[in-house]
Amino acid sequence: MYQLFTITNFLAKSRKLLSLSLATAVILITLQIYTVQALPIPKAFKLMMQETGVQVYKKDYANANSDYVTVVNLEKGTIRNLTGTVEGTPEGIVKRKLPSEFWQDAVKENTSKRKVMVVVNASFFSTNDDPTGIAFGLKLGGSTISYGYAIAKEYPGQIRTFSFNPDQGIANIQSYAKETFDSTPEVVGALDGVANKSAFSYLPRTFVGVRDNDGNGTKETVIFYSSSYARQIDASNVLRGFGANAIAMLDGGGSTFLIINGNSLISTKRKVPHAIAVYAGD
């Protein structure tokens, strides 16, 4: 009888411990989800536009310049590569276009569920040519346009790829490798945020970051930084403030442009070969 009582008592205590463990696990998971979702917005940035999967924030400065940050949740919104006419592959050249032409191209891709909100410049290229080569590589819609004419020639160890899969709703920034072009349908060659492109000068800048919202190891949010007057460290700091886990520098200077809802907020007269469109909805 004593042995039976001991076993029964042990089982009762075990059930209590199991229930307590499960309750603790639920609390921890809930806290983790809350912490991940409670993402900070850096001081002085104000929400200027919000649509399905897309938010645009703005920060104004006393010198009349502004920073813009476009946040895209790829589970609800989407991004698309846009180029001019491509001639030849895999080391193709691309016809350059005005920013307004890229906006028009993006609008043509609107559907009943998807509407373009933002278009930004992206790839580095040779400003001496038109059509022009792509400096650090570009892949669009599963087809590699170029692996990059400047690979092994410029910025050794500082070349990056910004890759994304619109169908899977994921993105990544990593060191340049040809294997990335084999495994991902959309790839944009870029530079590390500290690569010296007049790093300490106040110039137009376009940067990109990626963020893992839910801590599952995949990055489902893309963050674009656009400014007409910033140093490289300024761009990186803002993206980190928005929670970016990895950062890359896109083309800047006279190539920088930003169009939001058809309005040119950062403008250039320079034609460029490549842009990225941001859509609300997927």
Image (cartoon, grey):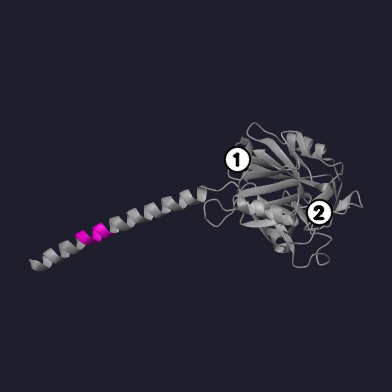
- The amino acid on which the numbered mark 2 sits, given as a three-letter code, is Phe
Q: Give the residues drawn in magenta, as a range.
A: 12-17
Mark 2: give few (<14), some (14-19) or many (20+) Cα within 10 Å: many
Q: Nearer the viewer, residue 254 or 176?
A: 254
Q: Nearer the viewer, residue 114 or 141?
A: 114
Residue 159 x, y percent position in the rendering:
75, 62
**Residue displayed at 84% across by 48% down:** 254
Query: Is 88 above or below relative to 282?
Result: below
Query: Is 66 above or below relative to 21?
Result: above
Q: Which mark is residue 230?
A: none
Q: Quadrant of the N terminus?
A: bottom left
Magenta region, mostly helix, strand or loop?
Answer: helix
Q: Is residue 90 magenta?
A: no
Circle 1 residue = 53
Residue 177 x, y percent position in the rendering:
72, 64
**Residue displayed at 69% across by 60% down:** 180
Residue 152 x, y percent position in the rendering:
81, 67
Mark 1: give few (<14), some (14-19) or many (20+) Cα within 10 Å: some
Q: Quadrant of the C terminus?
A: top right
Q: Nearer the viewer, residue 214 or 83?
A: 214
Q: Earlier in the sequence, mark 2 or mark 1?
A: 1
Q: Is residue 95 left or right of residue 265?
A: right
